[in-house]
Image: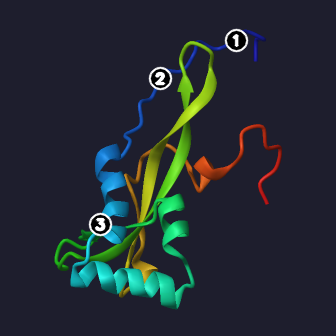
Amino acid sequence: SNGRIPPSSPVITMRLPNQHLAALYNTNLLDYSSREAKRVLEYLMKGRGLSKRTLRKYGVGRATKQHPLDKTSQPSESITFPCFKPALNENSNTRTNYVISRIKVQPLEQHAHWYIDPPDGPLGLFGYHTIPSGSKEIV
């Protein structure tokens, strides 16, 4: 190396999921009384021991999705887990809000066939939006 700093790398823009649609998944789970919604909600509450309050707080939702790698399958009821990342305030470079960066989609019947949507989105953390500002550790 000649000790020179290489030119800056080009900025890569990563896709984010549709924020409105991602928020709607939580509504589809908690605020609708369809047979499908009741089935997913029953699994999460009775089978996994989660309360409606916890599901709402973490944004867990329900969607009817087709696995992107299996175009021959029928869309199926799925649980959605949003991953959040801080949205920076451009003026002060501080975190002021959060955006959903990716969504883990887990079919209700085939838990092992989960996938991330979008697959090339920026990294995020499930529950990031619940971490108190100024925290030094996540356990």
Q: Name the residue tied to disc 1.
A: 5
Horizontal placement of 105 versus 28: left or right? Answer: right
User: Residue drawn 47% across and 62% down?
Assistant: 56
| As drawn, 130 above or below 41 | above
Quarter occupied by the C terminus: bottom right
| As drawn, 135 above or below 56 | above
Secondary structure beneath label 3: helix
Quarter occupied by the N terminus: top right
Residue type at mark 3 is: Asn
Quarter of the figure with residue 112: bottom left
Horizontal placement of 39 versus 122: left or right? Answer: left
User: Residue drawn 36% across and 81% down?
Assistant: 40
Q: How crowded is mark 2: few (under 14 residues within 10 Å), some or many (20 or more)?
A: few
Question: Spatial distance from mark 2 to mark 1, Cα to Cα?
Answer: 17 Å
**Percent x, y for residue 69?**
29, 68
Residue type at mark 1 is: Ile
Horizontal placement of 113 versus 125: left or right? Answer: left
As drawn, the label of residue 28 is: 3
Please indicate, yes or no, whether residue 31 appears anywhere in the rendered image: yes
Residue type at mark 2 is: Val
Quarter of the figure with residue 85: top right
